[in-house]
Image (spheres, grey):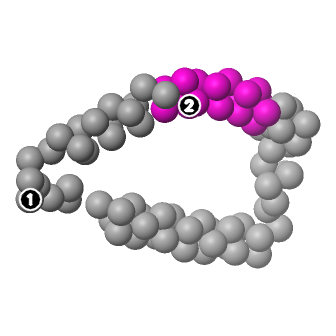
Amino acid sequence: MLTGALKILLKITIASLIVGTILSHFGITADHIMREAGLSRERVLDWLERGWTWALPNLFLGSLIIVPMWFVFYLFRPPGARSD
């Protein structure tokens, strides 16, 4: 499963590099696209900061339940059971 996710991530990275190179060739930049959309760097950074401050406590809270449950299920799985 992890190798499939890595393959997808690699494909997205390569496609992004190709499209970014093409757009850069035509003089289109990220700042230009953001300006056309009515966004600024400060606004995007503010959204990222607010998202991070919301997500981190919720991620931690959820992991306090999920990680111990996973550990208990892992301990009590049948002998010889594979986790593929």
* Camera-nearest residue between 83 and 49: 83
Asked whether residue 39 appears in the rendered view, the answer is no
Instruction: Tell me where residue 64 appears, x and y as whole percent.
Output: 49, 28
Q: Depth-wise, is mark 2 or mark 1 nearer the camera?
A: 1
Q: Amino acid at mark 1?
A: Gly
Residue 55 sits inside the magenta stretch: yes
* Camera-nearest residue between 8 and 26: 8
* Camera-nearest residue between 24 and 84: 84
Residue 17 sits inside the magenta stretch: no
Tell me the quarter of the image containing the N terminus: bottom left
Residue displayed at 35% across by 69% down: 3
Residue linked to disc 2: 59
Left or right: 18 with respect to 72?
Answer: right
* Magenta stretch in the rendered image: 47-63
Residue linked to disc 1: 80
Q: Amino acid at mark 2?
A: Leu
Residue displayed at 28% across by 36% down: 72
Residue displayed at 38% across by 33% down: 68
Instruction: Tell me where residue 2 appears, x and y as whole percent.
Output: 36, 63
Number of labels in the image equals 2
Task: Tell which circle, 2 or 1, labels the residue nearer the N-terminal end.
Answer: 2
Q: Secondary structure at mark 1?
A: loop
